[in-house]
Image (cartoon, rainbow, N blue to C red):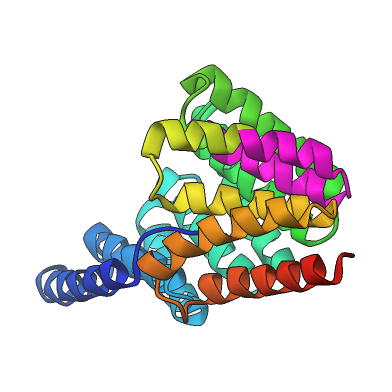
């Protein structure tokens, strides 16, 4: 959810735009480098919250790679995954599911079960189904992804921590807050070991722990996690970024509940 800083994304967009202009001049429209540039621009704009712009770049990249490679190619699967993520960010969850399902079918054909691209697709499908209220379906996808990633990477890997965070979110949606906390705590311990204090994944884990403790009425614990998450977000993304505003709002509500003693 949280990644990189505002300044880094703007700098990246400037570089990607220059690369796209140059590659268009050298190669023309339907060249793999041009599709890569558009994908990179789509990812950067999506991270800045400009999701429709992201969709436009990813659609152009997908059209080009389909012409160059045909249906069952890893680059085409990546384009569909990126489009699914951009539509997900726009709240178009069924559209997201459609793209992620196509990506999964293609990646399974190309790589088989235990491959990072396949687990990425499984995780993204889990998140989309979770947002559609299909929590048990979401848990099934996230459990498959976590089992595969544990086999591939072992315990203390960022992908495994992300998988546990995703499972925590799905159990949270089912109202199983203590189960959610267990997964979020494992994710936080792993991410702290891997990245240290100032990292987007650590901020994400703390925010999620804040939400789970808040739902259990443990407002002091919730406030502590929200405050720690907000310090990083304000510093890296700025106080007016949607993620910072979201955590600030959660913190304000938790403080109000604490004061009322409810």
Is 77 or 71 nearer to us in this picture? Answer: 77
Q: What predominant SS class does the magenta segment belong to?
A: helix
In the rendered image, residue 222, in percent from the top left (x then y), is placed at 70, 55
Name which quarter of the figure residue 41 lies in.
bottom left
Is any part of residue 107 visible from this angle? no
Name which quarter of the figure residue 160 lies in.
top right
Q: Tell me, yes or no, whether the highlighted magenta stretch contains residue 70.
A: no
Is 53 or 236 nearer to us in this picture? Answer: 236
In the rendered image, residue 235, in percent from the top left (x then y), is placed at 37, 67
Q: How many marks?
A: 0
Is residue 249 positioned above or below 80 on the image? below
Q: Is residue 34 left or right of residue 78?
A: left
Is residue 111 positioned above or below 91 on the image? above
Question: Quarter of the image containing the N terminus?
Answer: bottom right
| Residue at image location 34% in from the left, 65% down from the top | 5
Q: Is residue 110 left or right of residue 226?
A: left
| Residue at image location 27% in from the left, 72% down from the top | 7
| Residue at image location 60% in from the left, 68% down from the top | 247
Bounds of the magenta segment: 160-185
Is residue 174 positioned above or below 219 on the image? above
In the rendered image, residue 173, in percent from the top left (x then y), is placed at 82, 53
């Amino acid at each position: 959810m949280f990644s990189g800083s505002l300044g880094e994304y703007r700098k990246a967009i400037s570089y990607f735009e220059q690369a796209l202009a140059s590659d268009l001049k050298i190669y023309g429209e339907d060249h793999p480098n041009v599709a890569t540039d558009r994908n990179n621009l789509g990812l950067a704009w999506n991270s800045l919250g400009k999701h429709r712009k992201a969709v436009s770049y990813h659609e152009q990249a997908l059209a080009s790679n389909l012409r160059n490679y045909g249906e069952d190619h890893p680059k085409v699967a990546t384009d569909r995954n990126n489009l699914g993520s951009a539509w997900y960010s726009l709240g178009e969850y069924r559209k997201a599911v459609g793209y992620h399902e196509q990506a999964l079918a293609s990646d399974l054909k190309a790589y088989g079960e235990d491959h990072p691209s396949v687990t990425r697709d499984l995780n993204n499908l889990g998140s989309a189904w979770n947002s559609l209220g299909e929590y048990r379906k979401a848990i099934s996808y996230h459990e498959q992804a976590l089992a595969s990633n544990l086999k591939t990477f072992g315990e203390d890997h960022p992908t495994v921590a992300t998988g546990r965070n995703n499972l925590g979110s799905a159990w949270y949606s089912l109202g199983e807050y203590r189960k959610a906390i267990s997964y979020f705590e494992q994710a936080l311990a792993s991410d702290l070991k891997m990245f240290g204090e100032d990292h987007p994944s650590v901020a994400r884990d703390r925010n999620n722990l804040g939400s789970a403790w808040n739902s259990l009425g443990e407002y002091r614990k919730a406030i502590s996690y929200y405050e720690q998450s907000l310090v990083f977000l304000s510093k890296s993304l700025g106080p007016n970024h949607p993620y910072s505003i979201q955590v600030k709002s959660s913190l304000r509500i938790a403080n109000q509940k604490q004061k009322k003693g409810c």
